[in-house]
Amino acid sequence: MLWLALHFRHLPLEVFTRGTRDPQPLAITSGAETGATIVAANRPAQTRGVSAGMNVSAACALASGLHTIARDTAKEHATLARIAAWSLQFTSLVSIAESGGLLLEIEGSLKLFGGLNKLHQHIARGIAELGFNAHIACAPTPLAALWFARAGVAVRVQHQDALRHALEKLPADLVCDTINTRNLLDSFGARTLGDCLKLPRDGLARRAGQRLLDQLDRALGMHPDPRLPFVAPQTYAATLPLPAPVAHADALLFAARRLLAELCGWLSATGHGVQCPRFEFIHEKQLVTVITLELASASRDLDHLTTLLRERLARTELPCAAVEIAIASGRVTPLASRNLAFLPDSASHEESSSRFVERLNARLGANTICGLTPHADYRPERAWRACRPGAPANVNENAIASPATVPPFTRPLWLLSTPRPLRETGAAPQEPDGNPLSLLAGPERIEAGWWDGQHVARDYFVARNKAQSLLWVYRERDITARWYVHGFFS
């Protein structure tokens, strides 16, 4: 087996800061208000002298504009669980480890992703896109991989024979559970794991306890080290607190994309696509702005979902600055992967058309875009119906064939909503300004509508005007015999 370990050393800080790209001096505190200490500080705070373990009052004296947030271990555990769900797209076995770490069994995934190096790069890029900074290491045993990651040693040990030599260089602090154990090993002169392995096992067990030896044996693969597998949730929901109120749409989109990346990873792991993801932008004074993306078909494309959200945010007026973002997957449907063709085909054309319609709906608003479908009726103005974009044509095959479905003559693409009357001189049609029209083709007789009280009887012609434009004109077959223009070819 081959294990890849992820250790999130700055997780207490990143659960708050990953939603912004322009951070202010920020520190995470722990303990009582009177004796609170700094757990972690971001880079702007560190440049002013703030460091972990410092008293909060001393930190505020060094950085006058320092913003402090109490550590939220519940958010850390929830965030780690969502990263585990995201990681299931790379392997079927993911386990949450102690001290803010994840373990992925990746031996069965190497061939799929093109080898260890490419898989390592893929995971590293994905973690960075989520907004986290993780130490990554690989080893044949889970505990060894976790120790390498916790020590910040980015090794990729694939064979058992090289494991002991690599472990011997790690500091002995990794195997110490208590200060007493650390002091005991110091008294023996054991500074590394290699020094611990050279000590007599019986004496070390009597003085430091059997647990220390068991950990060393599990790291070396001499004892089994089973790990509890993580099970992905049935639905996805997440929140992202913002370290400071955000009022600009671009900054909110940057933070929301972090959550969308998590969502798309979970969708890939479960084999689903999302159709109605719901966003809640939580403002001060308990105000909430809700944005729901309505997709024509299920998707888990991060760039496409980000584009739709950008369009919606651009036309959404926020009541005030947002302090938190929440996302829920909504309805999900199975979405099987498909092979891409070398040349564009009908499936890719339908997909691109569907995404174009979704972008228009996101920019212009819901129900602003419609499609057209043929309708079995000889009357041109009734030979079509509005429908949902992309909906299949619904034509009754038993009905009389409509000119819109099987046209015996050419039809113009531009029909006037109301036919425009023309002048007539010597039985020849003229435009309202008096210019005559030349009849090029026709007549095509259309007589229908007696069944619904909208009877029409017309003779249609293709005509050309003085400007060389082609018109579709007709003459009423009643006592008036008036001429009308009904559409334009060009």
Image (cartoon, rainbow, N blue to C red):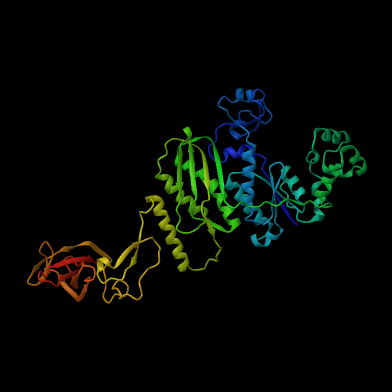
Q: Residue 140, relative to residue 10: is it above or below?
A: below
In percent of width and height, residue 165 lies at: 82, 49
Asked whether residue 157 appears in the rendered view, the answer is yes
Q: Is residue 489 visible?
A: no
Quick check: 442 above or below 467? Answer: below
In the visual, does 464 lie left or right of 185? left
Among the 4 quarters of the image, the one containing residue 379? bottom left
In this view, the residue in front, 279 or 49, is 279
Where on the picture, by quarter, is residue 198?
top right
Relative vertical location of residue 10 with respect to residue 67 in this rendering, above or below = below
* Residue 128 image point, x, y percent: 60, 47
Answer left or right for 239 relative to 54: left
Q: Position of residue 42 (x, y in %)?
A: 61, 34
Residue 236 rendering spot, x and y as whole percentages: 57, 49
Instruction: Check the picture and name the quadrant holding the N terminus.
Output: bottom right
Front in this rendered view, residue 122 or 441: 441
Residue at 56 percent across and 58 percent down: it is: 272
**469 or 130, which is in the foreground?**
130
Q: Residue at x 57, y 38 (%)?
A: 17
Number of numbered labels in the structure image: 0
Which residue is found at the position 28% from the left and 73% from the top? 403
Q: Nearer the viewer, residue 470 or 272?
A: 272
User: Extreme left residue here?
Assistant: 426
Q: Is residue 180 left or right of residue 481?
A: right
Which image quarter is the C terminus in? bottom left
